[in-house]
Amino acid sequence: MKKILYLVNTLNEGTIRGNALGFKLDILLKLEDTRPSNSKMTLMHYLCKVLASKTPPLLEFHKDLISLEAASKIQLKSLAEEMQSIVKELETVKEELDALENDDPLSELTTLKEFVGTAETEMTSLTNLYSIAGKNADALVVYLGEDPAKCPFEQGNSLIMHEVTATLLSFVRMFQKAHEENCEQAEMENANGKNLTK
């Protein structure tokens, strides 16, 4: 992101947009569309070329984002609704168990009691994980310069998280494609250069 910010600031040097401290994520997707009028090379290709020559390890940044595709498919709002439904259903089962115990205290309900105990433990674990996801979503919203109070986790942040992960996933795919095209272009130029020297 720092390299992209530097690149964008260099392009906008001397304008009102120069010396920016940050950028919105949608800029990442515009790198593929930005090109000089007389060139086939996009800004994405140029970024890949610069990274390949100056900091090659950064070309592998996508390896740190292996969960990005799975994360882009998660709908936090739907997850919250499903959790609420599960909690209500578990409460119903517990009420039915209590009613059965009151009607026939000597009946064999051990299997149902074990199920309820296991389900309560798993529900507590799931609730804790959901809470952690909410805190992480809020932290990301703050990091992106938004106010988490204006878009609660169960509502707005769900949309923001989906947009962020989808944008980053698209960026990663475009970046990898541009890098592959740069490598193919370099191979063709090397092959043409060898043919010229023969």
Image (cartoon, rainbow, N blue to C red):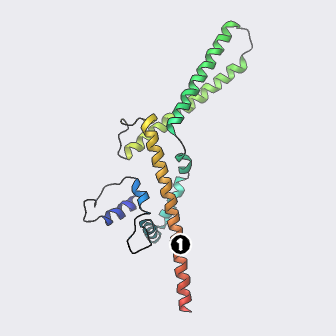
Image quarter where the C terminus lies is: bottom right
Residue at image coords 53%, 81%:
190
SS assignment at label 1: helix
78 is higher (above) or lower (below) than 101: below
Q: Using the rendered image of the protein, determine whether residue 127 is visible from the camera's viewpoint.
A: no
Q: Residue furthest front?
A: 37
Residue under the point 54% across and 79% down: 188
Name above or below for residue 105 compared with residue 67: above
- Residue at (55%, 45%) from the top-left corner? 73
Residue bearing mark 1:
183
Judged left or right of residue 6, residue 60 is: right
| Amino acid of disc 1 | Cys
Query: Where on the picture, by quarter, is residue 41?
Result: bottom left
Q: Examine the image and state in which quarter residue 97 appears.
A: top right
Residue 192: image location, x then y, percent: 54, 84
**Residue placed at 53% from the left, 91% from the top?**
197
Residue 171 % position (x, y): 47, 57
Left or right placement of residue 51 versus residue 97 in this view = left
Is 118 located above or below residue 60 in the figure? above
Question: Where does residue 143 sit, x and y in percent of width and height?
Answer: 38, 46
* Quadrant assignment for the N terminus: bottom left
Within 10 Å of disc 1 (Cα), the crowding (few <14, some 14-19, many 20+) is: some
